[in-house]
Image: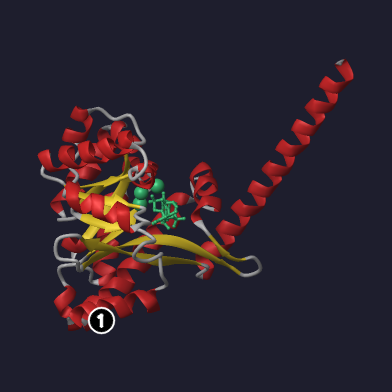
Amino acid sequence: AKELGVNKFKVFNKAMHEKAMQNLLIETEIRQGLPEDEFIPYFQPIYCLQTKRLAGFEALVRWNHPERGFITPEHIIPIAEETGLIVKLDRLMLLKACREFSKWVSTYPSVRDMFLTVNLSPCQLSKPDLADAILDVLNETNFPSDMLKLEITESAIMERNAASTFNLKRIGEMGIKLAVDDFGTGYSSLSQLQRFPASTVKIDRSFISRMAEDHESLEIVRAVNALGHSLSMDVIAEGVETRQQLILLKEIGCDCVQGFYFDKPQPAEVAVQLVKMRSEG
Ligand code: C2E
Ligand code: CA
Ligand code: CA
Ligand code: CA
């Protein structure tokens, strides 16, 4: 038994070591890839339920790795967050997404009422230079600040400090909007949500994916939608995959929907075609 214990420990150690080595490799590669233009934003359409029109896009990072091909965020974000590289990565995504979107708006001025949402890692809110960095991007890309929405996960709205309060104030003054992402998965209180200056709440995919089969999930979606509306927020349902979910969300009175039922995240050249179509009809 003793021997087994030792072996187990060895195996555990080896696995941990391999994992650490792999993370180190990825970290190095992220660091190298950042200036090399390997990270690009994909755009997932968000639709307004009432008008059935394209309302905006969420920018989601993709890593075009020189040897390993396309890599999705689940393999990037955790390591980037652990190593602090996320700050650079998020800001690069903001820059690239705004640059792209700016082109679309100047080509198709009638889509000026759309929005672009960009994810911000929770740690960003405490960076003293966040507001200035965003302002630089807006100026550099000539991006209308009222078209920008920053997504911050529910868990991050609970950690308020002097820096984050300052950032939120300045972001608001610039006319940028905020969305609470993955709502329902954190443990924020009603008063924390009320105090957070967001204009949008996004219901987490886990509830949407269960709502057609599971009564409790359906009631949670209903409750979050009502809560959002009572705080004068727009409500976006994420991860809509079926027609049945869509019908339920319409009946509930949700404002916007996003999910594979409509579109997957798409490269800019595909997304712009949707913008063009909307501008024509
Ligand atoms: P998220 O912010 O909740 O983004 C939505 C994720 O759900 C995206 O995954 C999207 O592709 C996926 N999704 C959308 N609709 C459906 C659907 O109908 N079914 C299913 N199964 N999935 C759907 P993705 O692109 O892999 O991103 C995963 C997460 O990585 C994001 O979750 C976000 O937390 C993070 N992330 C992505 N890009 C960035 C970024 O630039 N910065 C930061 N800080 N985080 C990012
Ligand atoms: Ca998001
Ligand atoms: Ca989300
Ligand atoms: Ca999520």
Quarter occupied by the C terminus: bottom left
Horizontally, residue 119 falls left or right of residue 2, namely: left
User: Which of the two residues, 20 or 116, is positioned nearer the viewer here?
Assistant: 116
Q: Which residue is mark 1?
A: 276
Helix, strand or loop at mark 1: helix
Res. 279 visible in picture: yes
- 113 lies above or below 123: below
Q: What's the residue at 26%, 73% (across, down)?
A: 102
Q: In what quadrant of the picture does the N terminus appear?
A: top right
Q: In the drawing, does residue 33 fall left or right of residue 132?
A: right
Q: Position of residue 62 (x, y in %)?
A: 48, 63
Using the rendered view, name the quadrant where residue 163 is placed: top left
Instruction: Kindly indicate the quadrant of the structure image that contains residue 133.
Output: bottom left
Furthest toward the right, the residue is 3
Residue 157: quadrant of the picture: top left
Identity, as a three-letter code, of the amino acid under mark 1: Lys
In this picture, is 103 found above or below 31? Answer: below
Residue 54 at x, y = what percent? 23, 68
Image height of 15 relative to 139, above or below:
above
Q: Which residue is rendered at x = 21% and y = 34% of the image?
A: 193
Can you give x and y, in whole percent of width and height, for residue 18 in the image? 73, 43
- Please state the quadrant of the image where ligand 1 appears: bottom left
Along the line of sight, the residue nearer the viewer: 158 or 223:
223
